[in-house]
Image (cartoon, rainbow, N blue to C red):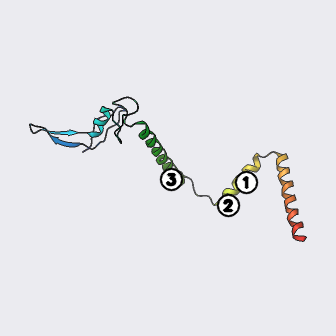
């Protein structure tokens, strides 16, 4: 069974309940996750939580690690969804598209300069072969 108690952010706790019997035979359920949060102990290590006791779940180092892990998971998920949404483009086609957009953004002077350098490089190769 899982804990249905609402947490500090309005979400269901979801921790696994531990069943125990008291002295007079009643069955009671305890949620270690809720108990740790209410005591101000980190969910993954024995340190004090960062932030307000009763609301915060993690200490500073565990919180940073958790945020990094969630960020990586979100990034992987986003990449997978993006690959499903966008059709794969052959590499040559992608290069052509990039070249065209780069050429559109160049000024006429810069375009002439690039063409001039290309011509010089071509003729330098031709002269080198002829020599």
Q: Are marks 3 and 1 in contact (CB under 8 Å)?
A: no
Does 32 sit left or right of 120 as displayed?
A: left
Label 2 element class: helix
Instruction: Decide: few, some or many residues near mark 1? Use Cα within 10 Å; few <14, some 14-19, many ≥20.
Output: few
For the image, the number of numbered tags is 3
In this figure, which residue is indicated by the disc labeled 2? 92
Expressed as whole percent of the image width and height from the top left, the position of residue 1 reads: 24, 45
Residue 2 occupies quadrant: top left
Cα distance in 3D space between marks 3 and 2:
23 Å
Extreme-left residue of the structure: 24
Q: Residue at x 49, y 47 (%)?
A: 72
Does 16 sit left or right of 21 as displayed?
A: right
Question: Which label sits on residue 99?
Answer: 1
Cα distance in 3D space between marks 1 and 2:
11 Å
Q: Are marks 3 and 2 in contact (CB under 8 Å)?
A: no
Residue 127 occupies quadrant: bottom right
In this figure, which residue is indicated by the disc labeled 3? 80
């Amino acid at each position: 069974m899982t804990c249905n108690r609402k947490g500090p952010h309005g979400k269901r706790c979801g921790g696994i309940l531990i069943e125990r019997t008291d002295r007079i035979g009643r069955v009671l359920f305890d949620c270690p996750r809720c108990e740790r949060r209410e005591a101000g102990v980190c969910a993954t290590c024995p340190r004090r939580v960062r932030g307000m006791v009763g609301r915060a779940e993690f200490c500073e180092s565990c919180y940073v690690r958790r945020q990094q892990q969630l960020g990586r998971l979100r990034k992987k998920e986003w990449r997978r969804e993006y690959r499903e949404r966008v059709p794969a483009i052959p590499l040559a086609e992608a290069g052509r598209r990039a070249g065209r957009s780069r050429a559109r953004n160049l000024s006429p002077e810069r375009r002439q300069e690039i063409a001039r350098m290309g011509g010089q490089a071509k003729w330098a190769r031709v002269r080198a072969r002829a020599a």
